[in-house]
Amino acid sequence: MEIVQVSIAEALEVLKLAENHFRDLKAKEIKPAKLTESVSAFANSSGGELYVGIGERVTESGKVRDWNGFADQEGANATIQTLEAMSPLGNHYRAEFLYCDDFLGLVLKLTIQKTREILTASDGVAYVRKSSQKLPVEGEEALQRLRLDKGINSFEDETIAIPLEEVSNSITIIEFMLSEIPSADPEKWLRSQLLVVNEKPTVAGTLLFSDQPQAALPKRSAVKIFQYRTREEGVDRDTLAFTPITIEGPLYDLIKEAVAETKRIVESIKKVGEIGLEEISYPDVTLHEVITNAVLHRDYSIPVDAQIRIYDDRVEVESPGKLPGHVTVDNILDSQFARNPKIVRLINKFPDPPNQDVGEGLNSAFDAMRKIRLKEPKISELENSVLVEIWHERLSSPAQIVMEYLAMHDNITNAIGREITGIRRDVQMKDVFVALRRSGQLEQVPETRGRASMWRKKAT
């Protein structure tokens, strides 16, 4: 394993690291079997980093950390051997030693990968990471939840106690068969695709081919659209522009209608631009791909509808369920893992399918935003969902945006500045104006003060 020499400044930064959902620090005296509990927790969650060789002692002023690593590489042999035994290939982690001339010993840095399979500790128990804690997964129900979270099991294969005719004789399946396989019998074809099991339709079959899957799968198969007339987070019903819209129907129709309705609402929002009020417009491919991913890759075992929340400066798309398999926020654009492989495969057989470039959807969404110099979408993994934020925010700095605006206008106010830069607080916007004044680019319009303050380009 590699020994990486770090400076004293870098070593001190390690000692100050906060323990959180993605990071933990342990003393070198920790028993290897005990350490595997933390490794299991990271591997079964989102991955993370473990530093072994950081001690902690209590002083009068509080807890103090010490760099107290292994005397040599061989000192960590027992730990490495135990970690290797956790999985057949030992590819769930990467190890390196950190060395600093000013401190004692080698600190073992372990980078734990999120694994496709459930990884158990030496005691045979699986753990998960919650904030800075490792928690055992106890009971079959909790293990099943973990299997669904990791995509080992898929809820799309569960059967539903509804009449078979709901999927075998629906308008949706008849239209699909006429376009795809005109000579085939719908029921026979559904059975061949394992969408009918024990005379019952599966979740996948119902979502794709029932005319109204929401009747069989309430609270988990629709898309809800909200519009808030604000930029603020954590808003309440008072800022809702209208009663939330519920989009229903089979997945193929649901995706198309959700995309069209979101686009219609977004384009009704006005922003201050170079020539007055202008429409907000995102690339069609961005809205389409993000919403398609939210519908196709969500966890249908969670009884919550997907949500699209439209604000004055952004669109948020929240999809129930954690990222499946080995997928993380960091590798999502480079990884492929379908939580619902049957749904993904079969919806691609529809005319003009929503997932035309299977596995490339989010990449297309990001590329489209880059081409028109809008900020890339932001992907976050929450406790039980994945959130994608699409911002109407240019890549230019706030100062550059202000100067570009003043190239077309005589003056600018704090309110207009916040509108065109995406800055939310008037104090932060004022700091931009003050910085431009100090650099000799702006001056305050005489006799304007307080909320009525105006700024203009400094005369040369």
Image (tube, rainbow, N blue to C red):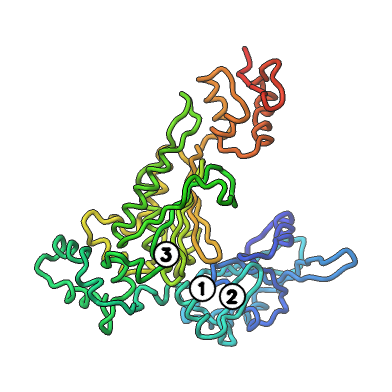
- Mark 2–mark 1 Cα distance, whole angstroms, equals 9 Å
Q: Earlier in the sequence, mark 2 or mark 3?
A: 2
Q: Amino acid at mark 2?
A: Val
Label 3 neighbour load within 10 Å: few <14, some 14-19, many 20+: many
Quarter of image, res 249: bottom left
Quarter of image, res 431: top right
Q: Earlier in the sequence, mark 2 or mark 1?
A: 2
| Residue at x-position 54% and y-position 82% | 120
Identity of the residue furthest to the bottom in this view: 123
CB atoms at circles 2 and 3 under 8 Å apart? no
Label 2 neighbour load within 10 Å: few <14, some 14-19, many 20+: many
Q: Which residue is mark 2?
A: 39
The quarter of the image holding the C terminus is top right
User: Is residue 254 depicted above or below 26 in this figure?
Assistant: above
CB atoms at circles 2 and 1 under 8 Å apart? yes
Q: Earlier in the sequence, mark 3 or mark 1?
A: 1
| Front in this rendered view, residue 124 or 444 | 444
Q: Which residue is mark 3?
A: 298
- Mark 3–mark 1 Cα distance, whole angstroms, equals 25 Å
Q: Which residue is mark 1?
A: 92
